[in-house]
Image: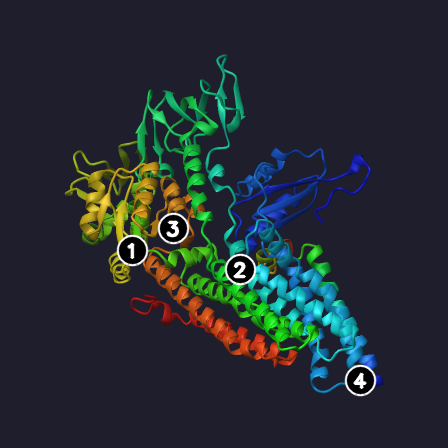
Amino acid sequence: MSSVAILIPIALLMGLAGLGAFFWALKRGQFDDLDGAANRILIDDDMDERP
Amino acid sequence: MTSTAHAEPSHDAEVTTVLVVPAMHCAGCMGKVERAMAAVPGVSTARVNLTARQVSVAHAPALKLPVLIEALAATGFASQPLSDDIAQPTSAVKPLLAPLAVAGFAAMNVMLLSVSVWSGAAGPTRIVFHWLSALIAVPAIAYAGRVFFTSAWAALKHARTNMDVPISIGVLLATGLSLYETVTLGAETYFDGTLMLLLFLLSGRALDASMRDRARAGVDALLRQAATGATIVGKDGAIQWLAARELVPGMVMRVAAGERLAADGDIIVGASRFDRSLLTGESAAIPAQTGDHVLAGTLNLAASVDVKVAAAGADTSLAEIARLMADAGQHRSAYVRIADRASRLYAPVVHTLAALSFAGWMLTGAGLHQSLVIAIAVLIITCPCALGLAVPVAQVVACGALMRMGVMVKDGSALERMAAVTRIVIDKTGTLTVGRPLPDPAVLDALPADAASVALALASHSRHPLSRALVEALAARGVLAASLTDVSEEAGEGVRATWNGVRIALRRPENASGMACVLDIAGRPTWLIPFADRLRPDAADALSRLEAMRAEASILSGDNEAAVAEAVRATGLSAIAAATPASKQSVIAALQAQGHKVMMAGDGLNDGPALAAADASIAPGTASDVGRQAADFVFLGASLLALPRALAMARATRRVVRQNFVLAIGYNLLAVPLAISGHVTPLIAAAAMSLSSLVVIGNSLRLALPMRAMAPGGGQ
């Protein structure tokens, strides 16, 4: 019983943390441009440094 | 990130400018645009939004807009400032993401607590778990359920009902009952089932919305097609650039080659050729000279001309087409979607059942509490969980399958409307045909190798549409260009040059019916290369498949009688020629009046009103922006097989949606007697709900199997 009393608050807190992270990302505009995010990884940032 | 409204001191406050860059489509473009913007002195950050085809640039207030546009133009990207009068497309999915996340979080945690209650937790543990569930569930339901509550309230206020009314009533009653049970330390709560219901329904909504979002990329393409302004020559010779809305009849515009006209008018100085394909669907350039009338939206191909404005802005023929389209689109928005039609029948039945079981148990003397619990159990078990998924899941799967076949679907209601189609009207130029003149392949086959390489070399020196088509066709055959000297092009006549000391020319024929060009090599017989706009590949196959699906097709073209007659001979369809945008629309209306559900397939601006008026419409990817905007479906690639594919898939989707309804209602038929007899526990409710949803999703996934949709006569 005592283990449950510890585990349940931990589980809830972790879930809430995930939910909070999602809301934070939503508010920061992370989901505004899904196509762009998918393509952005292909941009060469170090274009000038190449020989 | 984009907020610039901080209370910063005004002297170093940055301003954000948003530019629309329609040509961006990949990572390379994003990189180029961002680097080009960042390189402009005064710019601090530039961030591309690829979904919206926009770049927002934060810069010093001193930096002016033309500098930014110039910098982008230097890298090859045309751009324009985001105008205030064009409303930003609002995303339909975004407002649903937060409720979906909350419902998901709450449903998982409450289910975890419920499982231990079901497996026998009793006494203080059960009480604590019920209270915990209530603490999580009540705020979560209040937040995630808002979508349904507001919609249901709006419907009820207008004395109507929709799918959200039974959902809201069920959710609110179940929450209230569970809360009561928690406070009175009762045995059973329905928090888990209620949250799961919200989660499933919100997923259905989000799927439906994401489909609509994907399609809404190009906003207000029609207005962007018109030149946004013109160079005006004053009476005293002063030259000035004016925006399109400031043009007034009587002004003189100077239109350079390659510019689009901003207003209708008459040529007063000069002569040129004009590409009217945007307006009429004809790909051949129209010559016009002093005194001729030219239309807004046409492209000046050859030489600079002065045009006296006859009509501007809302009076142009382009604006007229936009108006016709806006009127035509209204009747389509009156279409009632399948899910809403189903709910009109569903809600009264369910509420009557719940009321009857309440009354029945009261009469048998069961007491208020027990009767109420049973009535609410009926409502929960009949809550349209699988019903809410029945339509969107099937449509999303079908859209995905169609997309893999190269057909883009704008929204789910388009699939529903397409499924009912009994009559098909096809535009000729650009839809039934490829839309541009192609050289006769038989003549090209017969051409000797050296003559072919000379023809390619000559054609590559000209921007004439026939030359470009010849270059494309010869290059595709692997011909290499010969090296020429003394090349000269004479507008309207042809290209001349010298090849190994021999005088050669690719010129206009002296006398030939239809389009053709002549390859002239001194000392050899001349070659006549005829050009014609050809039917799309697979056109015959596509038309016969449509016929097999009992959808009669006919041609409706703005082109002249002779050109249409040729298409009629090739396809065997009936046809109407020389149709104006308005008469195309009235042909559609006449067919609809006969009781037909009409599909319009077209590409040009002139098809816009007809595309908007038809019950469903499809346009090729090569269509004008207006065509693509007005159509429900857009197909990529050259094959006309997209038409039967879209129709077959729409009918298959309708079949699967109907099966889903039968499955969802069938589950209710099994579960409702259990609920009425008072045997439903929260465990049974939760299990039945997820099981029926899974069955519906599984059935919908069958649409992804390619063979089903393409089976001969698929979806009768």
Mark 1 lies on a secondary structure that is loop
> Which residue is denoted by mark 2 in the rendering?
B208
Q: Earlier in the sequence, mark 2 or mark 3?
A: 2
Q: Dot 3 corresponds to which residue?
A: B615
Residue B38 in the image: state x and y as whole percent.
Answer: 66, 45
Three-letter amino acid code of the residue under disc 3:
Asp
- Residue B222 spot, x, y in % from top left: 46, 39
Alpha-carbon distance for marks 1 and 4?
84 Å
Q: Earlier in the sequence, mark 1 or mark 4?
A: 4
Asked if residue B700 lies left or right of residue B352, the reply is left
Residue nearest the observer in this picture, B180 or B616: B180
Q: Tag 3's secondary structure?
A: loop
Give the residue at mark 1: B477
Q: Which residue is mark 4?
A: B123
Distance of label 2 from label 1 (alpha carbons): 46 Å
Of the pair B316 and B201, the residue shown nearer to us? B201
